[in-house]
Amino acid sequence: MPPETHVLDPPSILFPYDKVRNEQSDMIACVLEAVQERKHTLIHAPTGLGKTAATLAPLLSKILSPDFKDKKLTIFFLTSRHTQHKLALDTLRLIKEKYNISFDVVDLIGKKLMCLQPGANLLQGTEFNEYCKSVREDKSCEFYVNVRESVFKLTPHGHKVVDDLKTILPIHVEVLMEACKEDKVCPYEITAEIAKDARVIIADYYYLFHPSIRERFFSKIGKELEQAIIIVDEGHNLPSRIQKVMTSMLTTNMIKYAIKEAKKYGYTELIEKLQILQTIFLNIAQGLSFEFGGQREKLAKKEQFMQPLAAKLDQEYDAFIDEMEVIADAVRILQKHSFIGGIAQFLKAWKGQDEGFVRIMNLEPSKTGPVLKLSHRCLDPSLVAKGVIEQSYVTIMMSGTMLPTEMYKDLLGFPELAKEYTFDNPFHENNRLAIVIPKTTTKFSMRNDQQFSAIAEICSQVVEAVPGNTAIFFPSYHLRDQVYQHLEPKTKRTCFVETPGMTKQEKTEFIERFKQYKNTGAVLLGAITGSFGEGVDLPGDLLKGVVIVGLPLQTPDLETKQLIAYYQQKFGKGWDYGYILPAFQKTLQGAGRCIRTETDRGVVVFLDERYAWPMYGRCFPEEYQVHVSQYPIEEIEEFFRKF
Ligand code: SF4
């Protein structure tokens, strides 16, 4: 049954389509209230409701209205993935065309991804920034020189490219990059120039939620955070993204390669200093081993590294960092990348605060042998997000899997008075069958061959009962492989086995081949945190079934334990916030692959006995109408017979 639609009220909203769904209309009202009353807002709204149009249309209408004109507000539509930019850009293009209005839009991806210098994409984030800075300063990047006469002044050629591109906005960043390539100008510099006048900027989270990137970016485009309306799309990803960007790591390999680099370029004194650093690093790791029952990780302290280093080098800690940075700059001129620079970056980060962070030394296997990692890991994303949200004009965070919204409000430091809204599924509830089959488990203590065989047996029966493609998601690739050994001989369906670390091209080809089996039915076997557990859209009849095998709980390692303890102390909800709900969020992301549009129909199977336990069962959103099934195969067959 199609969702109800009606004509939009108020009619002044620049809505891109002729009709608006009831749920969309309600969401527009929430967004209008958020911007009018400057109330930071969290919105959980299921996939398919049309969240992008329901946020961009009212916000754009507001900032272009006479009441708001003097406020000079800019909308920042932030995403965690580049693929999400397209929908926002297409929505804005429709608005522009339908209402024949003029406003500038910028589509921005990471500077490194936009860089035209060969090999730049191989550099690490900080390394790339240092490299770009040095080639701009010594004017050896022709693409930069072609755009700017000085930091604040464009060349006549740069002016012309900016003016030409402004006439065809909004355009996808790939189109802009092609144009810049032809004109031999830096795409990032051109985009930043256009962004100065843009009313909407579509970008990755870190342009606003990485402290130093935000500072540089805002100063470059001449905008203020106080005048930013922030939309965080797929907001459930924001806490982990912030934790990741605020985490720093030093490994045995980094030190080894830095020593090699110092030898290669003849920095004799530095070689000795790095060897001292290596000894201190190894001292911290003492006691860790791969032996059976051996300790693989332990907590570390700031002083354990800083004090002995300064004492043994007979040099101030900061002076050592400065010395390495100077050498790294010289190395980058010769080979772009510098491991010495990477170590300097880590030493800087290691000076950082303890509150909301944890320091861990751990031993991990790798292809080249055991690797030691010393890390300063961020536990508390609110340390960064709170300030951004509070300073912004208004922040609206939305997602199709952001339940409970209260958790995200707490984790990111939204103010107490922030609004929270939960919207129902706009699609007919009979379009989805969601069942728990409580006959197996992937609980660590219960993992054995018999269990894997039982899981494979149920999976093979489910895929047989689904008249089309099915995706099966596992907590890890390792577990997937264990089950697959048993599943392969049992199923007649063609199996598509995801490989870790697939390139964009490989992923596209993989999915395209899988889609071709929509009538006969194939099986995709992947990891829930892999390439397809989130971010792949298989609408219509391309995917009719999803099986979530097990509960993707984090390994209870030192970091997870510290996270639980931290959230327990801060919110009194350590297990929920640090362990159970993040796992459930992944489960629901995977489950959500099935129903993407109002005409989709599909079955979602939660295959683990723990989904039937009250502790976990309470985490299912009501809209799923999940029930434990005693006769799952019959239910699945019956469900598909209805259509
Ligand atoms: S100025 Fe532009 S083209 Fe040159 S290195 Fe930096 S990002 Fe790359």
Image (spheres, rainbow, N blue to C red):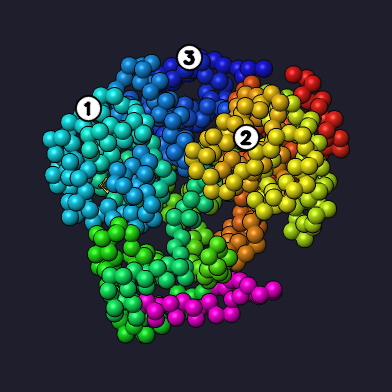
Identify the residue shown where x is 47% and y is 70%: 252
Sooner in the amino-acid sequence: mark 2 or mark 3: 3
Sooner in the amino-acid sequence: mark 1 or mark 2: 1
Mark identifier at residue 18: 3
Is 99 above or below relative to 342?
A: above
Mark identifier at residue 593: 2
Span colored in magenta: 273-299
Q: Quadrant of residue 565?
A: bottom right
Q: Quadrant of residue 618?
A: top right
Identify the residue shown where x is 19% and y is 54%: 137
Within-10-Å neighbours for mark 1: few <14, some 14–19, many 20+: few
Q: Type of residue at label 1? A: Asp
Sooner in the amino-acid sequence: mark 3 or mark 1: 3
Q: Quadrant of the C terminus?
A: top right
Within-10-Å neighbours for mark 2: few <14, some 14–19, many 20+: many
Q: Type of residue at label 3? A: Asp
Q: Quadrant of the N terminus?
A: top right
| Residue 221, image x, y percentages | 26, 42
Q: From mark 1 to mark 2, how far is it between C-alphas? A: 40 Å
| Residue 440, image x, y percentages | 81, 48
Is 411 above or below relative to 396?
A: below
> Is residue 91 a member of the stretch shown in magenta?
no
Cβ–Cβ under 8 Å for marks 1 and 2:
no
> Is residue 289 a member of the stretch shown in magenta?
yes
Q: Which residue corresponds to mark 1?
A: 164
Q: Type of residue at label 2? A: Arg
